[in-house]
């Protein structure tokens, strides 16, 4: 029998993280701790990390709702996936805690990645900022050996963003460095086609969410005519049931979808998206969504079971000053886990002043 404890925790960014929706400086999350009543050493930890301006399940009542679902989980001694289907960040946290608790190990799945034998290829993420800041970040990512670089665009002047992309292309061809861009829905319907054609001149691999979500017919037209493959991200938010998932994919026909367990239905919800996408010839990859290392560890280990050869978006673990320490490390353009490294004990989750 396990008891469930909720531990609020405020993550602090090392430097402001900019998107077209605004700037993140801190991130309120909640850890959920499953602890065996008979054995304090037997525990499982998960992370509920909603994004206040993006998650479909976040509002002023989030903490109370989380507490209620944790009580149900404790009473039932299981994670009720159907009950939690419409609450993806809570579902993901409880799924992670249960996996950890049942495995009795930080090795959540038995894969070459979880055994420390291989790394997962990831993209280098360039956050929005002033032109010079972004240029420095690009140079740093290239020096570190990334072969796939993703830029968040849509916040500064488009001409300056093109200049940043041209800077990369002046040093590396598309064969040497894959370029992805993420507009976070920033382009208007009237300007999007022209911007896509200008971006296409720079051999862009894909663009995430060029227009805001919820415009299925407009997005379908874009996916059918864009010179750049389109990847959907925000479009998946709030779509929790398989029939609706299938309807969206069949209507829009995107070239790719991007799966984020915290936003897109937990692990179980993302596992529903994958066969639906495969059946329609839609590609996909996995990305973390500003979780701490606890959530990132689970996402990465789950991702490793899927054997997807594309670069994944799992490089967000170094964003925070007070992240929970796990033996996750980026070497060149790969994320590695050292299963023999030092993993956190219970006391580390109660120290909010790290």
Image (cartoon, grey):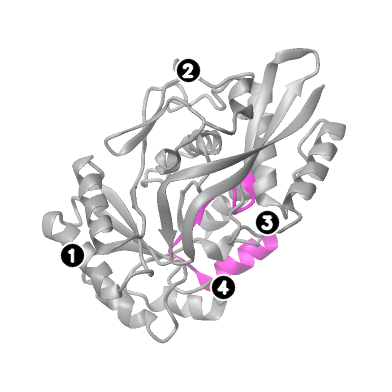
How crowded is the residue under tag 2: few (<14 C-alpha within 10 Å), some, or many (20+)? few
Viewer-proximal residue, 34 or 76?
A: 34
Q: What's the distance in space between the residues labelled 3 and 2, CA to CA?
A: 33 Å
- Would you name the residue on which mark 2 appears? 342
Mark 4 / mark 3, whichever is N-terminal: 3
Please say whether residue 259 is one of the residues in the magenta stretch.
Answer: yes
Horizontal and vertical percent position of residue 285: 45, 50
Q: Residues within 10 Å of mark 1 (few under 14, many from 20)?
A: some
Magenta stretch in the rendered image: 240-266
Residue that mark 4 sits on? 251
In front here: 200 or 280? 200
Q: Nearer the viewer, residue 177 or 15?
A: 15
Residues at marks 3 and 1, CA–CA distance in whole angstroms: 38 Å
The residue depicted at 33 percent of the width and 60 percent of the height is 129
| Residue 200 visible somewhere in the drawing | no
Task: Please name the residue shown 56% across and 73% down the image.
Answer: 251
Whole-number angstrom distance, CA of label 4 to CA of label 3: 27 Å
Q: In front of the other: label 3 or label 1?
A: 3
Separation of disc 4 and disc 1 at Cα?
A: 34 Å
């Amino acid at each position: 029998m396990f008891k469930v404890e909720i531990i609020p925790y405020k993550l602090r960014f090392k430097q402001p993280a900019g998107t077209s929706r605004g700037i993140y400086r801190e991130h309120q999350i909640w850890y959920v701790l499953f602890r065996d009543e008979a054995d304090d050493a037997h525990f499982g930890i998960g992370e509920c990390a909603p994004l206040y301006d993006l998650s479909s399940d976040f509002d002023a009542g989030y903490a109370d709702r989380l507490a209620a679902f944790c009580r149900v989980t404790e009473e039932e001694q299981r994670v009720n996936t159907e009950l939690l289907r419409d609450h993806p960040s809570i579902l993901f946290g409880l799924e992670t805690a249960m996996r950890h608790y049942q495995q009795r190990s930080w090795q959540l799945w038995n894969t070459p990645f979880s055994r420390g034998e291989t790394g997962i290829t990831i993209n280098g993420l360039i956050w929005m900022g002033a032109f010079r800041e972004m240029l420095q970040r690009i140079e740093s990512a290239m020096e570190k050996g990334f072969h796939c670089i993703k830029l968040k665009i849509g916040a500064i002047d488009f001409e300056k963003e093109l200049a940043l992309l041209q800077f990369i292309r002046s040093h590396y061809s598309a064969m040497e460095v894959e370029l992805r861009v993420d507009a976070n829905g920033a382009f208007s319907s009237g300007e999007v086609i022209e911007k896509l054609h200008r971006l296409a001149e720079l051999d862009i691999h894909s663009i995430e969410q060029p227009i805001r979500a919820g415009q299925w017919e407009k997005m379908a037209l874009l996916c059918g005519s864009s010179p750049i493959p389109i990847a959907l991200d925000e479009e998946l938010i709030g779509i929790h049931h398989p029939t609706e998932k299938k309807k969206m994919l069949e209507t829009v026909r995107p070239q790719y979808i991007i799966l984020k367990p915290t936003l897109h239905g937990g692990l179980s919800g993302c596992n529903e998206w994958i066969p639906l996408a495969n059946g329609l010839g839609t590609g996909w990859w996995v990305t973390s969504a500003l979780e701490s290392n606890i959530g990132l560890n689970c996402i990465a280990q789950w991702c490793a079971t899927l054997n997807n050869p594309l670069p994944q978006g799992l490089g967000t673990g170094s964003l925070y000053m007070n992240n929970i320490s796990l033996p996750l490390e980026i070497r060149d353009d790969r994320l590695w886990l050292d299963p023999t490294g030092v993993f956190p004990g219970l006391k580390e989750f109660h120290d909010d002043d790290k």
